[in-house]
Amino acid sequence: MRLGTGFQSCRVNNQTGGALMKPNSDQNITTAWTNGLLATMDPEVDDQYGILPHHSLLTQGARIIGIAPTRGLDLADFDEVVDLNRALVTPGLVDCHTHLVFGGDRAGDWEMRLNGFSYAQVAAQGGGINLTVTATRQTSFDDLYRASRHRLEAMMAEGVTLVEAKSGYGLELEAERKLLEVVRGLDEYLEVDLVPTLLAAHSLPPEFVGRPDDYIEEICRHIMPKLWREGLFEAVDIFVENMAFNLDQARRLFRAAAELGIPVKAHAEQMSAMGAGRLVAEFGGLSADHLEYLDEDGVLAMSGQGVVAVLLPQAFYFLRDAKVPPIDLMRRHGVPLAVATDFNPGTSPFASIRQAMNMACTLFGLTPAEALAGVTRQAARALGRGHSHGQLKSGYKADFAVWEVKRPVEIFYELSASPLVDRVFNGISSMF
Ligand SMILES: [Zn+2]
């Protein structure tokens, strides 16, 4: 019997297109979630999924306050008791690399690539990231908000409760601020946590053609410090690639970030070995993402500093890449492996974290347990939230997903039908 308060809608906000305000759970309400199979993803539990059978998940408001054997638990001690009907419970899923907020689309780019042009050739002919930059600059805050909200709701419908969202389609102060304010608005009004990242160093804007060093200087001196002071992002990212920025420019950006105490990450070694994985490690960064061309030195450097490798198999698939990231090498050296969608209009128009898990296994050779850890515990760590998200554990957020499956691999086995039956955010059942 469910006695919970369920989904609560609050006030309507005009500016954000009628979004519901994020519900606040009553911090005092205690709930025992019983009769579920808990895949805690806690590495201290002796099972690859951290499964604890015959246990109940205990929450108070938005926090997990314990996991205890159901037998011997006095349910009368709790304000609410929820029967999970033998469903599998995982931590809320985490998408730790997305480009959620953008205007326009890149279907024309894709058609060109299907007709034989390379990604670099498409960019050189006016497509690529800067096509999205033009469209995004011309799109209003409200329209960006509405489009992003729909994308985010598709993610949430798959059990996602924490999403990283990058800027990077504005490439000048006001437009980058607009994107990050959209992310803040989404975080404020939807039943999901967002982590904003500044990716002003995504591509060279048209105003700086031929002057990449000047643009890096503009980011270091103006864009980054101003938006940081406004509290609009949590980490700084850069696309290190022949068609974007080089290692020296990344180093300058990271030095400026370090002076402000800003964590760093990079789009690294996607199309060529540039050394960005090593550079992120040198600066003690959060993650290096993509990594198809990561070499052994880079693996060792990342391993030594605990830098998370964020694998993006949908971009690999959509770009029809052939070179797979060095999974075995990273596994051997204990590099934490996260998995994300890289959702973006050009190279990964897929918001599905379940598809990302599926492809991480089929294309990159991850085990199902590695894939689930990759979108829970390891993804949370890539966002600097490893202490609060991504595990079912006392003290962690009461964000979890309830699946009508017998074994965890079924979460991402049949992509056409989601087995999600409930999604709990801040201790509140928000879907069914
Ligand atoms: Zn990306």
Image: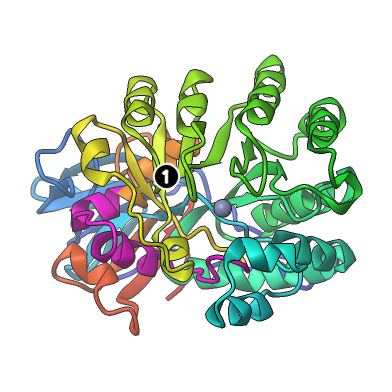
In what quadrant of the picture does the C terminus appear? Answer: bottom left
Callout 1: SS:
loop
Q: Is residue 421 left or right of residue 128?
A: left
Q: How many marks?
A: 1
- Horizontal side of 149 relative to 130 (left or right) equals left
Q: Quadrant of the N terminus?
A: bottom left
Where is residue 325 drawn, in percent x and y?
34, 48
Q: Position of residue 41 (x, y in %)?
A: 25, 45
| Residue displayed at 57% across by 67% down | 118
Residue 78 makes an appearance in the image: no
Label 1: how many Cα within 10 Å (few below 14, some 14–19, many 20+): many
- Residue 262 versus residue 291 in the image, above or below: above
- Find residue 243 and report its horizontal and vertical position in percent: 65, 49
Q: Which residues are magenta?
A: 345-373
Return the residue at label 1: 291
Residue at horizontal 21 percent and vertical 71 percent from the top: 410
Q: Is residue 174 magenta?
A: no
